[in-house]
Amino acid sequence: MNNYQPTIGLEIHAELKTRTKMFCDSANDPNEKLPNVNVCPICLGHPGTLPTINKQAIINVLRVGLALGGQLTERLEFDRKNYFYPDLPKGYQISQYKNPLVAGGTLNGVAITRVHLEEDTARSIHNDDGGGSLIDFNRAGVPLLELVTEPVISSAKQAGDFAREFQLLLRYLGASAANMEKGEMRVEANVSVRLKTENEKENEKFGVKVEVKNLNSFRAVERAIDYEVKRQIKMLEAGKPVIQETRGWDENKGKTFSQRQKESAHDYRYFPEPDLPPVQIGAVPEFNNLAGTIPELPWQKRKRLTQLGFLQKQDVEQIVNDFALAELFDQVAVALEKSELVKTAANFILNDIAGQRRKKPDWPLPTSAHLAEVIRRYQAGEIASPQAKSSLLSGVITKVAKTESLSDLVSKIIADNLKVVADFRAGKQAALQYLIGQGMKESKGTANPKILEDLFKKKC
């Protein structure tokens, strides 16, 4: 195995967040349950219909390009990619070929070839009982970003890490929800294997490329690449040629399977889209001055949080990887200002709030104002940890028993528990804990244990 060098390139498709589809006014709604309702003559490919360009989709891709450090095109062009599938209503796909919106760029140390824009296909629904297939055209014409990396990835883990970081980027930019389980982001891997040699020029040559499709989770991306690398090495060691083809991924069996021989660009007969003349990017006001709209990006946030000094690496990743948690942390940090309070807030966010979200993904996060108030009162000793947690999870600030009322309560508990008081006076610390427990019980959790402790020590 160590004598072989894998070479991997990724192609990632992501459905963009826009109100309407790429070339028509039909709704772009990934949550629509009814089939074939978000359709019109344009996205159904009726003869004589003409497309119009969705500006927001262009803006989304240009912002992605800026975040990646890529070169933005000066001339917006579309091409026709011709192939015939049941899920392609026009018999061709409007895409970009020679002039993508973005050329170059890097992410996670991986060089990027291009980022371009096209329209998505319809969704095929296959009946398991052999009853044929159905087509839902709601997705047909949805704006689809495609990113292509250079073939410079050398392991399944590196590929998975790249895909995860790109998903984060899309979410931070608001360009796509990029939920892989919903098909909003799909990954394809081009995998080849070659024998290592001592000759540098020989090392630059690639093996036979195999494209692996149907990767709908990061786990599937990594498992499929691992399997395909091992499959190709096994073939080479057995003296069998690796065939250039497209293979699918069977998640249940944990293996790839042959689908068809891989097409080349000339098979698609690309030519300029005649219904969409070229547009100069600079001539459209909405396409200019987008650099100022780029928010703090995942890697920038990661660096800033690390520099705070009190967050562990895994804590930083937990915050960065959950966009909602990251927003809450930043908002409460501004509200609290003092670093010791922010550190306390981080503990509650990473443990209690994040834990509740894992149990109930739809649970609404507390507001930053509510969280800040809970932290201030907790740090001031007005409420204890259980009360703070309860306040965060319920969204209601716990009422705290005042010291004056607790004084009377402590006196009553002492009078009712003279033997326990005697044990405490004799030096038994467990007796004090019992008295504090009674105080918490009688106050229905509204007392501060520290105040109770001080009162018992004073009155006993």
Image: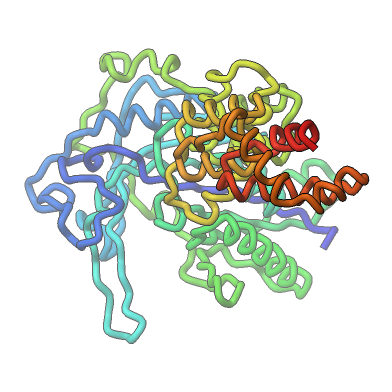
Quadrant of the rendering where the N terminus is positioned: bottom right
78 is higher (above) or lower (below) than 250: above
User: Residue 42, percent across and down?
Assistant: 13, 47
Q: Splitting the image into 4 quarters, where does residue 264 fall? A: bottom left
Which residue is farthest left? 48
413 or 169, which lies in front?
413
Residue at 57 percent across and 55 percent down: it is 218
User: Residue 345, percent across and down?
Assistant: 62, 31
Which residue is farthest right? 426
Residue 272 in view of the camera:
yes
132 or 173, which lies in front?
173
212 is higher (above) or lower (below) than 333: below
Residue at 20 percent across and 45 percent down: it is 27
Tally the marks: 0
Residue at 61 percent across and 72 percent down: it is 254
User: Residue 341, percent across and down?
Assistant: 65, 24
Colour pattern: rainbow
User: Residue 324, percent across and down?
Assistant: 49, 37
Q: Splitting the image into 4 quarters, where does residue 52 fall? A: top left
76 or 422, which lies in front?
422
Residue at 9 percent across and 45 percent down: it is 49
Q: Splitting the image into 4 quarters, where does residue 55 fall? A: top left
Quadrant of the rendering where the C terminus is positioned: top right
44 is higher (above) or lower (below) than 146: below
